Image: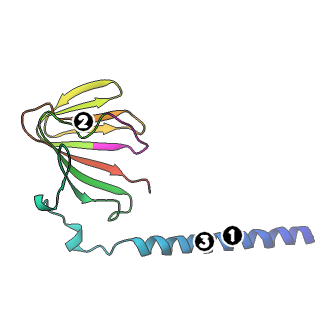
Amino acid sequence: MKLSTTIKVAVVALITQQSIFSQEAKKEANSTTPNYTIENCVNHFELDKAVKTKVGYQYWFADKNFTLENTLKMSIVEPGKSTHAPHHHVEEEFFYILEGTAEFFLDGKRVIVGPNTSLYCPSNSEHGISNPGKTELRYLVIKKDLK
């Protein structure tokens, strides 16, 4: 009987401790979460706030410091250039072509697409995007951030 009571007490203690750790983790997560308002939840593209890159520029509509786990960025790539060589990472990723022509590379195959096309990159797939056109390529990058 005493062993059974000891086990019950240990289980209750573990559950209590787990609950306390869970509450502390929630408090910590909430303390780093921004205060969301209509003013900071609406983001209009402004070229002077874009970051210049070697091949064009990028503009973060929502980065990992603003959202809980998703990011949204617009990349602008000059004709004949690409943001980087084909690569892979754990996060899955979506591209949405706004303007221009994109050459999409996925696991050894290539396709050329135009505006209003979405491109999906599964986790750990080798992928890349470049601009084979004569005008700027503008596309959105949507990704879940693994913090």
Q: Would you place residue 5 above or below residue 85 in this image?
A: below
Q: In which quarter of the image is the N terminus?
A: bottom right
- At 17% from the left and 57% from the top, the residue drawn is 50
Question: Which mark lies nearer to you, 3 or 2?
Answer: 2
Determine which quarter of the picture holds residue 122: top left
User: Is residue 14 located in the magenta-colored stretch of the structure?
Assistant: no
Query: At numbered mark 1, what does the secondary structure look like: helix, strand or loop?
Result: helix
- At 64% from the left and 69% from the top, the residue drawn is 18
- Front-most of residues 25 and 46: 46
Q: In which quarter of the image is the C terminus?
A: bottom left
Picture colour scheme = rainbow
Decide which of tag 1 and tag 3 comes sooner along the chain. 1
Question: Which mark lies nearer to you, 1 or 3?
Answer: 3
Q: Would you place residue 125 above or below residue 21 in this image?
A: above
Q: Where is residue 129 in the image (x, y as percent from the top left)?
A: 24, 36
> What residue is pinned by disc 2?
129
Q: Where is residue 49 in the image (x, y as percent from the top left)?
A: 16, 62
> What residue is pinned by disc 3?
21
- Front-most of residues 73 and 26: 73
Query: At numbered mark 2, what does the secondary structure look like: helix, strand or loop?
Result: strand
Instruction: State the separation of the CA atoms marked 1 and 3.
Output: 10 Å
The answer to whether residue 69 is left or right of residue 1 is left
Q: Which span is picked out in magenta? A: 86-94
Decide which of tag 3 and tag 2 comes sooner along the chain. 3
Magenta segment's dominant SS is: loop
User: Is residue 92 located in the magenta-colored stretch of the structure?
Assistant: yes
Could you tell me the amino acid type at mark 2?
Ile
